Structure formats: structure tokens, C-alpha cells
Image (cartoon, grey):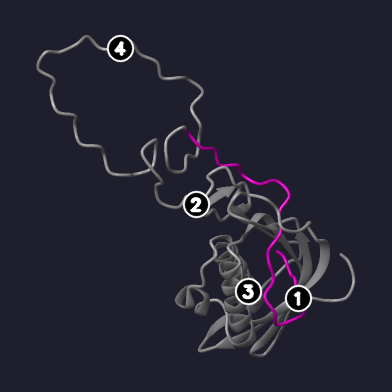
Amino acid sequence: MRGRRAVGTALPLACAAALLVGCSGGSGAEVVVPDGTVTGSSPAVDPAPTPPSAAPSPTGGDGGAGPSAPSAVEGDVLVVEETPRTAPDQPPHEAELRVTTPVSGEQVAVVAAWEAFWEQLAVTFGVPRFDPTAMGEVATGEALAAVRTYADDLAARDVRLSGRATTVADAVVVDGDTAVVEGCSLAQDVEIDDRGAPQEAPRGPTSLRTELVREGGAWRVSSYGIVEGLC
């Protein structure tokens, strides 16, 4: 995932191949654009026309935007998808997480918390909307404040993150009630406006450090950010 500033500041996430969302001729977002064309001839004149039927309420499909697409598992990659706020042909913000080091014991719980944090971050910056309850379950302290700051900044500028954010964990160290996950952020996601126009260039691979603390028996991310050097 993406780390835009120093440790403790908000990081956008990263992406190389985004899932495109198409649009139909009607209003609302479509996941698939049908290939066929609806045709028909003019009806015969009816001397006693019947009143038109009531239009269906928007439930997705051709009539309007439906609910956000759910998360899906593609192989061993968890993809977190969000319905675009405006233009339906914009790619969503997605999280791809990889763990390349063997883990055991308490490291397993640390990695699970690390994954939950980056997954929620993808959703938050892809809308963008800060959910204090959802983020509070996976982050605390500096990390929680940094996520709020960047999500609010995105919303104020009417932009969001788009693309796939790939984050790799290659070292997990646990020391009592603190832990560190070190790895790599393969940043291919970018800020886009409501027309889908990129507002920046992808940053590329950078080293990433995520710190966690155990509070009340649960691990949460306390700070995160890029560190010196490429990965």
C-alpha cells in the first residue's frame, strides 16, 4: 500500500491492474456493460392509451446505482472494492496484501491485524470517508489521526484514491505488547478527480514500516509510513 508521508502520516495505497467498472446509457453505475442493443418499432396508435406504469426504484442494474460491490477473493489476493462516487467508469481502490515470511505464535495475530488495517485503509481512501468506528477497530494513536487527516483532505479536494495498492510484509517482529511489520509498498494507486483524471503519477516501490500495539488483548496499528530506501 501506499505511503505518502513520513511515519505517522496518512499514506495513500498502491495499484497496477485495476478492475474497470463500465457504465450504461442510463443513469447509475453498472458492473458490466451489455454488448447487445435494445431495439424496437413504434407501437400502433391506441385510441384509449393506458397510463404509464410507475418507474422502478433504483436498485442497481440499468435503473440506477446499487450498493457497493462486496469484497472478493481472487486466488490468495483479497480485493476490496468500493462503488465510485461519480463517474462509473473509474477503477475502484483495491488492496492486495502479501506475506512472504513464515509466521507463528503471536506473529499470526499481528499479521491478521496488519492485514485488517490495510484493507480498511483501502476502503477509507477509495470513497473517501473516515469511519471512526471501523478505523478504530484496526488503528490507534498516530495512525488513527493520520488516516482521518488524509481522508478529510481527499474529501475537501473532491478526489479519491484509485488503483490497486500492493503491500508486502517480509519481516514480523513481536516484543511483548509491541510489534513491527516491515516490507514494501508497491505504490501504483493515484489520486483521481470525479472525472477519473489522475492528479499525480504513481510513486513506485518504497520500503514501508508498520508499528502495532496490543491494547485490551487486540492488536492495532499505531503508526505507519515509508522509510529510507527502495525495496
Location of the C terminus (image quadrant) = bottom right
Q: Using the image, determine if residue 32 lies above or below residue 198.
A: above
Answer left or right for 136 relative to 104: left
Residue at 55% from the left image edge and 42% from the top image edge: 21
Q: Callout 4 environment at 10 Å: few (<14), some (14 to 19), or many (20+)? A: few
In the rendered image, which residue does mark 4 sit on? 42
Q: Callout 3 environment at 10 Å: few (<14), some (14 to 19), or many (20+)? A: many
Q: Which mark is residue 83?
A: 2
Is 14 in the magenta?
Answer: yes
Rounded to the nearest whole Å, what is the CA distance between mark 1 and mark 4? 61 Å
In the rendered image, which residue does mark 3 sit on? 150
Along the line of sight, which residue is nearer the eye, 27 or 69? 27
Residue span colored magenta? 1-24
Q: Earlier in the sequence, mark 2 or mark 4?
A: 4
**Badge 4 element:** loop
- Assign the magenta stretch its main secondary structure: loop
Q: Which mark is residue 191?
A: none
Q: Residue 63: horizontal and vertical position, in percent?
A: 36, 38
- Give the number of the mark in front: 1 or 4: 4
Q: Which mark is residue 5?
A: 1
Rounded to the nearest whole Å, what is the CA distance between mark 2 and mark 4? 37 Å
- Do the CB atoms of the residues marked 2 and 4 lie less than 8 Å apart? no
Q: Earlier in the sequence, mark 1 or mark 3?
A: 1
- Do the CB atoms of the residues marked 2 and 3 lie less than 8 Å apart? no
Mark 2 belongs to which amino acid? Thr
Q: Quadrant of residue 229?
A: bottom right
Q: Residue 153: horizontal and vertical position, in percent?
A: 61, 73
Q: Residue 180: horizontal and vertical position, in percent?
A: 73, 80
Answer left or right for 76 relative to 218: right
**Badge 1 element:** loop
